[in-house]
Each structure stands twice: as structure tokens, then as C-alpha cells.
């Protein structure tokens, strides 16, 4: 059966605020799944808690809406036990970079073959607009009683430093570009990360759609002044081609430096990609050769209700 | 009477091979047909602090340690200072004669409160604060002293073998100590060599040297030590006996039960289990290709439970193993598993809290916390094993409960069990059954993961299965698993989930809920690892004509109120025995059964109970001389 975009939509009522950037992300994700033709029952969307966390209910594949900050833990467990399914984890910036930051770093070290998308809106949407970890020092969004007293984390830089092997940024109002990035991320062999700039019209009155579009800059001249540009339109080459230390270090530092660019010019696209790092499944098959053919979820553990695991050798070694 | 009931103690600084020494000793005794109950005590430390191992050896079944030590072997001063007063009057001490002049100030690891107590005692006896002083008091009590210079032993040995490298090998002191002990009690030396081979099987060179040292010191003891009150020359071996360490029951139970995913974060005394599972990650499967257990060390316990839930959603039997502090971090996700009806098994090896508490010591102080763990109302099962052998079969049952009722199960174990080494009947995997409840292999037509059914259990699909798409959420959900806040659905969903508790009580066989070891006027209630010392104390009293009943409660939540009530119908005086301060089982008991507990026997020093202590307190109770709360304190 050929799957259409409509097949990936549920009829669950979507209660995001009108104009929320999340709509663009969920559309892009559905388009990407349709484009890749991934069967509905061969993909699982895991999500965190927040406005963004509701995403899994809007997509007609397996959907696991987990706990605040813990989405990566559930997703990795699922993927490890059933490596045949496509796993995409999604969640807010507070979810992934605040309460869940430890899991973010640990996931990078494992490099399990799955995708993680952060809905980066600079605020804690669902709890009414408190500052999220990506909001810049001194900025004051609508709900803040006073300007933000914390510096921001740099999601791209943190991902690169933690060992994610595909690191990219998208923009929720450039749905086609975002869809392309999601397809690349899902096809990437290893752990891929997408930081998606997502305007929150309700609480973030600093990084608005107009701000990203550079409307404020345009007032000074009549040219188009979108802050957002695409790395692929420049000479930037994110890909590691040989596993040599020099090249890897160069690509890592270039990604890190690029990730610091913010203000009048904001890069989107792929910052870093390295498929030469072993995915976690390879590290497992090195010690458990048939892991991928006979993963935990596929193993038969009993024969008519009786266990089929034979531990007699171990038991015999314990004989007195 | 038993013809053999012998307790041996070996001590030394952490890292000096006390444990491998004790393993060799236990193995030798087990091979000569004896039953073994061994237990390790240690500080939260890697090198230097005092650790010790007591091994009780008998010709009959034993389930506990006793207070009395018959023979102590020591190659350091601290062991002598700390344990000399545990040796019975016809007992013996084998010790390194080089230590005689050491005074208490030389031993840095003796803490001030202990030193104060010791000094007071030695002063009252008019003895100097030295090893010699302490040993004199022992001698005055009839204890036989067997001094031997460990240094000279090694020197003689190195000369005999013409191997000067052996001279300074203090790392072999443990093997010397074990062999001297075995020589003294006339244990045949054949199995000594075998056991050393076994213990050092991965290091043949070291095994070779140790074997030579062992035979040399064994012969030294046979030839030079005068006769001792105990001779353990071996008895008829009991068939189908194995020698196991504490975590073997749950680890092997997990392999057999088909647990194929275990995530964990390191914590004493739980991580041994995970490490053992990983060491045996490739599994032999009858008539099939090999299977495997994926063991993942996570970044914290929150991740451990998250991963385990993710894995379980794919239909994989999944588990984690942790202790109190780790379990505390898991409670939010525990509720998620509860509301999403996910089968998981948490093996909870308790230690003594609160907070970090006594991190390497025993305690049963997490019962109330476990029963009430998690925010909101959701069903779970809390189940406790009483000994290592039981824990193997109980692990199988716990997986079945979690699959059948689609709920989280917490299997409670503890430090007392995890650091014991015991002989028991060989585990029989065929006695474990596998019941996966309503787990589906295929789906036809429209599927609703949380469909309302007559028995409150919905057929369960798994992530990645054809046509089985479902949703999960930590929010309240409708039958598909989508968020709802509808008050009527809320009632139905709540009732559906909570009905599992009644279902579990009605369908778990009563023999798995609680076990009666007779009921008399005086009857004990208890749970978990106190079982062993209670059984032995009960036996000691029976031999004196005093009958005490004992009901071991295994299913702690939901509480088997009616069954326990019926068991205790004829008991007049109830005695609650637990290793915690507040008598936690007593509280649950009272809450459910509305009956007062007459006496509590409690211990919260962090050391396990001995049968002697329980015997003493029970006797006081029967003689009407006991306090309402008997507080035990034996053990260094
Ligand atoms: C353990 C825990 N703490 C706090 C909350 C409350 N909470 C719900 S959503 C949220 C923040 C959401 O912000 P973000 O992750 O950025 O997602 P967004 O709503 O912006 O998409 C918080 C703190 C919670 N659900 N769980
Ligand atoms: S609060 Fe912000 S992020 Fe949340 S739904 Fe509304 S617009 Fe979107
Ligand atoms: Mg946010």
C-alpha cells in the first residue's frame, strides 16, 4: 500500500495556539515519514512533556508521550530492544536541555541510530512562558518579571561536543527545508540531532516570526533581511569523509564556531555529519554477533509456557 | 543436636583477599559435604578499612549466622581487636605472631567510639591496650591461641621452593590463613587444591603459587598446632547441592524467565547482578540460535527505568536492579509505567538508609517507601524473597505477575541476601513457567491498546508490530492512548487499572502470597531475609520444647489481608521481626488487619540478624521479660 501524507495524521484535536511554530514541525515530520514511505507500524515517535510533547498524538504511527526530560531514555530503550523500527524522539528545549540535559549528553556518547528533534522556542510554553535554557542572558520575554539572569546553552555546540554524529538546525516556518533535514537525519547512520527554531507567538515576543524574518532590519533598507540563511547555500562542508583526527577536529571546530553565530545572521542546515563513528548497534554486535538478527524484541523465550533458556552449564559450575 | 556447627571468621583490610579467602574456605567445606552459610561485612571503602567474613558450617541445613565464633584467623591487628570477644571459650584464634606488640593507636582504622569501648574493657581487666593484652583475656576465657609468623612461613616456603619472590608476597596471607585453619580442623586437603584452582581459574600462574603456599601452611598447621576442639573431616555429600552468592538467584532467574533487557546505574548492593548478567550476556537456547541479554549501564537511575520501559513496550521482558537511593529517583517513571500498564520488574536490593545511610550495610527500611512509591494512585506489586533459593523462583513469578496484570513489580531483596554465600538445592529452571498474559502476536482489525474489557485487562500490542499502532501518555488517556480529561472516562480508566490489585489477590496462588511455618500461641510475622535467622531460632527453641509460629509474608502489596488474617487466627501473641527502626511491616499489617502487634524485634545497626539474637529475644518474650521493642545490636 502506498502511503499518503494524510495517512500519517490522526484526528486528535490539536490544541496548540494559533500560529504556533509547532504546527510546521509536525507537518514536516509527517511529510518526511510519507516521503520515506515508512510503514505506520514500523515507526515510533517518542515525545517529552510540554506543548511540543503532544506531537506524538498527532502522528499516526506508534506514539509514546513520555515524561518531562526523559524522552531520550524511553526512545533509546525502545530502539535497543527493537532495532528494526524507526525511532524519532521530540521534545521542548526545556525538556531536552534543562531537566533532560544529562540524558542528552549521555545519548551522544552512545550514538544509537535514531533522531532527536528539539522544538526550540526559548520558553517553557506549557507552564506559561518561563525562560528556557536557550533564552539569552538579559532577554525578557512576555512572562518574565525581569530579564533572564542565566546565559543560554548552545544546543548545536552541546550536541557536537557530546558526540552526536549528525547535527543540524531547521526553522519551523520553512517546512520543506525542515522536511529535507528530517529525512537526512532519519537516514543518517547513528544519532542525529535537529535544533528547530520555533516561534512561540504566545510567550516569546523576542524571537518572533517577524524577528526571524528580519522585519526590524528591513525597516532601515528596503531589501529582504531574513536573519535565517542556509549553510548549503554557502561553501560550508559539514561532512567528515575520512576518520582522520585532523579532519574530524577541523569539522568539529568549524561546527562549533558556526553554532555561535546569532543575531543578524542565523545559520540553518547541517552543521556536522560523521558516519564513520560506530553506531551503538555495531558496538553490540562486536560482542553479541547475532544481536541485529535476533534482538531482544524478537527473541523467543519459552516453549509452550516453559522456559527455553538453558543455564545448565552455569548451574553445573556451581555444583559442590 | 547437630554433630557439626562450626563458625569460622576471617578478617582483614579491604582489598587484602578476605573475600577470596572465604570463598576458598566455603568451597572446600561445601565439597566435603557440609552446608554453608557465609556472610560478608564491609565498609563503604575500596582499600584499607576492615572487612570480615563469617562462614558457618554444619552437617544439617542452616539458614543464618550465629553469634558464636569457633575459630578466627587473622593476619592483621584490627580483626583481633574487633572480634576477639566473639570467640567461644573452647574456640581458637590463629594469628600472625608478628602483631603481638601492636597497640590500638597503631591501627588507624579503629574509630574513636570503638577504641573507647575497647580501652574501657581492657582497663577493667588490667591489660595493656595491645594485641598481646587482648589475647591474654581470650586465653583466660579458655580460648586456644595459635600464633604463627606469616612472614616466616613465606620465608621457609620460598627457601623450600627455591623461589625468593615468594618471600614478600603478603597478598597470599589470605590463602595461608585459610589453609592453616583447614589444617587445624583436619579438613582433608584434597579439595583445597581444587578450590584454589577454581577461584583463580583465570590466573593459572597465581593459582600455582597459591596452591604451593596452601599445602605448605596446611601441613604446618597439621604438624605444629596442638589438637583443637573441632574436627571437620567431611561427611556424605547431599545430592544436587550448589554453592551460590547472593545475586545468583535473581540473575539466573532473569535469564530463565526470558528477561532480555536490563538497564542499570551502579549502586551497592545491586550492581553485582547487572555485571553478572552482562558477563553471561550470550545465552544458550534449547533447539535454537543463541539469545542474549542487552545490559546497559545508564547515566542515572531515571534513565535506567526510562530505557527499561521503552524496551518493555517492544514486548521485551525488561528489568533493572537498584537500591534505595536509585529507586527513589525512579518513582516518577514508575507511575508512568503504572498508568500505561507497562510490565516491568525492578529488583530492589535494599541497603540501610536514609539518604546514603550505611551504603554497604544491611537494612529493610524501604518497605513503606516502596509500597507507596510514586505520585497518584496506580497499581503495583511489591514482592519479597526470603532467601537466595527462593529468589530464583520468585523472579520467574515476578515477571509473570507483571505480564499478566500489566503492572510494575518491585521485587525486594537486600544486602543481607546479596552478600551471603550459601549452599542450597540446585535451582530447577523447569519449575519456572512463563506466562505473558494478554501479549499479542498479531492484530486484526481496529486496535485499542486500553480497550475496556470484562477483566480489566486489554490485549497488549508491542512497538513495531504489524497493525498494532497505539499511543501512550503519562496523561489520563482514552482507549487508544490519547490524552483525555473527560471525567467519566477518568473514572472508568482509574477503576480499570486499580482493579488489577483485586485480580492479583484473587489469582496469585496463596502459597506465593504468604508462607506459614506453623502457627502457635506466639507467632512471628516477618518479610524478606529475616526468614533464615527466624527459622533457625525457631528450631533452637523447638529443641527446648518452646513452640513459636512464623508467617512469612511475601506479597506485601496488595496486602493479602484475608489470607494472613486466617493464618493468624489462632495466634495469641504477635511478634514482628524486621531490620528497620519503625517496624514497617507491623504498620502495614495493622493498617490492613486492624490488629495490634504485641512485640517488635528490630535491628538497624546495618548488620544482619543472627539466629542467636532472635532466639534470645524470643525467649525473653515467652518468659514475659521482654520490652515491647527488642532492639538487636550484635555484630562489628
Ligand atoms: C518533573 C516535572 N517537572 C515539571 C513539570 C512541569 N512542566 C510541564 S511542561 C514544562 C516545560 C515545558 O517547556 P519545554 O520543554 O520547553 O516545552 P514547550 O512547552 O516549550 O514545548 C514543565 C516545566 C513536569 N511536567 N514534570
Ligand atoms: S504556548 Fe507557545 S509553544 Fe505552546 S502552543 Fe502556544 S504558541 Fe505553541
Ligand atoms: Mg520550550
Image (spheres, rainbow, N blue to C red):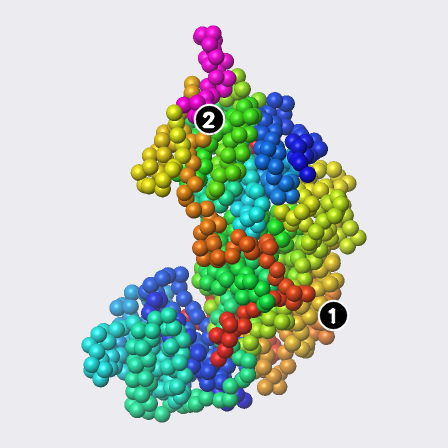
A154 sits to left or right of B436? left
Queried on whether the Cβ of the residue with tag 1 lies below 8 angstroms from ligand 1, the answer reads no
B603 sits to left or right of A15? left
Identify the residue at image location x=73%, y=72%: B569
Query: Which of B507/B110 is in front?
Result: B507
Instruction: Locate residue B627, reporting x and y percent.
Output: 57, 71
**Residue B268 on the magenta segment:** no
Q: Residues within 10 Å of mark 1 (few under 14, many from 20)?
A: few
Instruction: Locate residue B598, reporting x and y percent.
Output: 64, 69
Specify the quadrant of the image occupied by residue A142: top right
Q: Residues within 10 Å of mark 2 (few under 14, many from 20)?
A: many
Secondary structure category for the residue under label 2: strand
Secondary structure category for the residue under label 1: helix
| Ligand 1 sits in quadrant | top right
Q: Which residue is mark 2?
A: A268
Identify the residue at image location x=50%, y=22%: A207
Query: Which of B148/A9 is in front?
Result: A9
In front of the other: label 1 or label 2?
A: 2
> Which residues lie in the magenta part?
A211-234
**Residue A221 on the magenta segment:** yes
Can residue A98 be seen in this snapshot?
A: no
Q: Which residue is mark 1?
A: B566
Amino acid at each position: 500500500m502506498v502511503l499518503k501524507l494524510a495517512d500519517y495524521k490522526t484526528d486528535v484535536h490539536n490544541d496548540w495556539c494559533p500560529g504556533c511554530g509547532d504546527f510546521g514541525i509536525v507537518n514536516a515530520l509527517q511529510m518526511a515519514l510519507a516521503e520515506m514511505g515508512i510503514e505506520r507500524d514500523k515507526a515510533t515517535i517518542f515525545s517529552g512533556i510540554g506543548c511540543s510533547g503532544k506531537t506524538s498524538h498527532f502522528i499516526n504511527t506508534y506514539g509514546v508521550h513520555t515524561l518531562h526530560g526523559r524522552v531520550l531514555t524511553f526512545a533509546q530503550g525502545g530502539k535497543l530492544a527493537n532495532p528494526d523500527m524507526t525511532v524519532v524522539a521530540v521534545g521542548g528545549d526545556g525538556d531536552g536541555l534543562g531537566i533532560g540535559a544529562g540524558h542528552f549528553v549521555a545519548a551522544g556518547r552512545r550514538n544509537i541510530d535514531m533522531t532527536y528533534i528539539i522544538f526550540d522556542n526559548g520558553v517553557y510554553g506549557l507552564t506559561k512562558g518561563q525562560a528556557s535554557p536557550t533564552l539569552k542572558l538579559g532577554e525578557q520575554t512576555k512572562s518574565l518579571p525581569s530579564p533572564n539572569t542565566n546565559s543560554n546553552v548552545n544546543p548545536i555546540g552541546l550536541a557536537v561536543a557530546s558526540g552526536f554524529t549528525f547535527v543540524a538546525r531547521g526553522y519551523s516556518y520553512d517546512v520543506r527545508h525542515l522536511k529535507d533535514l528530517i529525512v537526512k537525519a532519519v537516514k543518517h547512520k547513528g544519532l542525529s540531532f535537529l535544533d528547530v527554531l520555533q516561534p512561540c507567538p504566545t510567550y516569546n515576543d523576542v524571537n518572533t516570526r517577524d524577528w526571524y524574518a528580519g522585519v526590524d532590519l528591513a525597516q532601515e533598507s528596503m531589501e529582504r533581511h531574513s536573519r535565517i540563511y542556509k549553510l548549503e547555500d554557502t561553501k560550508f562542508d559539514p561532512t567528515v569523509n575520512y576518520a582522520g583526527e585532523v579532519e574530524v577536529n577541523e569539522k568539529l571546530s568549524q561546527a562549533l564556531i558556526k553554532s555561535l553565530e546569532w543575531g543578524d545572521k542565523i545559520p540553518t542546515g547541517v552543521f556536522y555529519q560523521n558516519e564513520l563513528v560506530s553506531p551503538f548497534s555495531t558496538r553490540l554486535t562486536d560482542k553479541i554477533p547475532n544481536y541485529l538478527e535476533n534482538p531482544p524484541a524478537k527473541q523467543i523465550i519459552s516453549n509452550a509456557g516453559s522456559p527455553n533458556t538453558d543455564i545448565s552449564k552455569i548451574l553445573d559450575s556451581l555444583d559442590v | 543436636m547437630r554433630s557439626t556447627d562450626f563458625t569460622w571468621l576471617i578478617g582483614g583490610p579491604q582489598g587484602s583477599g578476605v573475600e577470596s579467602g572465604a570463598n576458598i574456605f566455603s568451597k572446600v567445606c561445601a565439597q566435603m559435604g557440609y552446608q554453608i552459610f557465609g556472610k560478608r561485612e564491609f565498609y563503604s571503602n575500596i582499600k584499607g578499612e576492615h572487612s570480615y567474613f563469617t562462614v558457618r558450617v554444619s552437617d544439617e541445613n542452616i539458614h543464618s549466622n550465629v553469634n558464636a565464633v569457633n575459630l578466627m584467623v587473622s593476619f592483621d591487628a584490627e580483626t583481633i581487636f574487633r572480634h576477639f570477644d566473639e570467640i567461644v571459650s573452647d574456640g581458637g584464634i590463629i594469628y600472625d605472631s608478628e602483631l603481638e606488640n601492636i597497640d590500638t593507636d597503631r591501627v588507624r582504622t579503629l574509630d574513636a567510639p570503638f577504641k573507647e569501648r575497647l580501652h574501657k574493657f581492657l582497663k577493667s581487666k588490667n591489660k595493656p591496650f595491645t594485641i598481646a593484652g587482648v589475647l591474654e583475656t581470650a586465653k583466660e576465657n579458655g580460648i586456644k591461641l595459635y600464633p604463627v609468623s606469616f612472614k616466616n612461613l613465606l620465608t621457609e616456603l620460598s627457601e623450600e621452593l627455591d623461589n625468593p619472590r615468594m618471600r614478600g608476597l603478603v597478598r597470599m596471607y589470605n590463602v595461608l590463613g585459610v589453609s592453616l585453619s583447614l589444617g587445624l580442623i583436619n579438613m582433608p586437603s584434597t579439595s583445597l587444591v581444587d578450590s584454589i584452582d577454581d577461584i583463580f581459574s583465570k590466573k593459572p600462574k597465581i593459582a600455582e603459587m597459591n596452591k604451593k603456599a596452601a599445602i605448605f601452611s596446611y601441613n604446618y598447621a597439621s604438624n605444629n598446632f596442638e589438637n583443637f576442639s573441632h574436627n571437620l573431616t567431611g561427611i556424605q555429600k547431599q545430592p544436587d547441592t550448589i554453592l551460590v552468592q547472593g545475586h545468583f538467584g535473581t540473575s539466573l532467574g532473569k535469564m530463565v524467565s526470558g528477561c532480555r533487557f536490563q538497564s542499570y546505574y551502579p549502586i551497592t548492593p545491586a550492581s553485582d547482578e547487572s555485571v553478572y548478567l552482562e558477563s553471561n550476556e550470550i545465552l544458550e537456547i534449547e533447539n535454537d540460535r543463541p539469545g542474549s541479554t542487552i545490559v546497559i549501564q545508564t547515566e542515572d537511575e531515571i534513565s535506567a527505568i526510562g530505557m527499561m520501559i521503552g524496551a518493555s513496550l517492544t514486548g521485551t521482558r525488561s528489568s533493572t536492579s537498584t537500591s534505595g537511593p536509585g529507586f527513589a529517583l525512579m518513582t516518577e517513571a514508575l507511575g508512568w509505567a503504572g498508568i500505561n500498564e507497562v510490565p516491568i520488574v525492578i529488583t530492589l536490593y535494599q541497603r540501610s538508609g536514609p539518604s546514603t545511610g550505611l551504603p554497604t550495610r544491611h537494612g529493610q527500611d524501604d518497605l513503606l517507601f516502596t509500597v507507596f512509591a510514586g505520585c497518584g494512585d496506580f497499581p503495583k506489586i511489591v514482592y519479597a524473597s526470603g532467601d537466595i533459593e527462593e529468589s530464583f523462583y520468585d523472579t520467574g513469578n515476578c515477571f509473570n505477575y507483571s505480564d499478566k496484570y500489566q503492572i510494575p513489580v518491585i521485587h525486594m531483596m537486600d544486602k543481607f541476601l546479596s552478600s551471603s554465600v550459601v549452599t542450597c538445592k540446585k535451582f530447577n529452571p523447569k519449575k519456572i513457567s512463563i506466562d505473558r498474559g494478554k501479549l499479542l502476536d498479531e492484530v486484526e482489525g481496529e486496535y485499542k491498546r486500553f480497550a475496556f474489557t470484562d477483566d480489566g485487562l486489554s490485549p497488549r500490542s508491542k512497538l513495531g508490530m504489524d497493525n498494532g499502532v497505539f499511543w501512550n501518555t503519562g496523561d489520563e488517556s482514552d482507549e487508544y492512548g490519547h490524552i483525555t480529561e473527560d471525567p467519566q472516562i477518568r473514572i472508568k480508566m482509574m477503576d480499570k487499572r486499580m482493579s488489577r490489585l483485586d485480580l492479583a489477590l484473587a489469582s496469585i496462588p496463596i502459597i506465593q502470597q504468604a508462607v506459614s511455618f506453623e502457627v502457635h500461641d506466639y507467632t512471628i510475622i516477618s518479610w524478606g531475609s529475616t526468614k533464615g535467622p527466624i527459622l533457625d531460632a525457631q528450631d533452637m527453641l523447638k529443641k527446648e520444647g518452646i513452640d513459636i509460629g512464623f508467617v512469612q509474608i511475601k506479597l506485601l502489596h496488595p496486602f493479602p489481608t484475608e489470607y494472613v488474617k486466617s493464618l493468624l487466627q489462632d495466634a495469641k501473641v504477635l511478634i514482628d521481626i524486621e531490620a528497620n527502626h519503625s517496624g514497617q511491616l507491623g504498620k502495614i499489617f495493622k493498617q490492613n488487619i486492624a490488629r495490634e502487634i504485641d512485640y517488635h524485634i528490630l535491628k538497624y545497626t546495618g548488620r544482619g540478624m543472627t539466629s542467636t539474637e532472635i532466639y534470645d529475644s524470643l525467649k525473653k518474650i515467652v518468659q514475659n521479660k521482654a520490652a515491647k521493642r527488642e532492639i538487636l545490636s550484635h555484630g562489628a
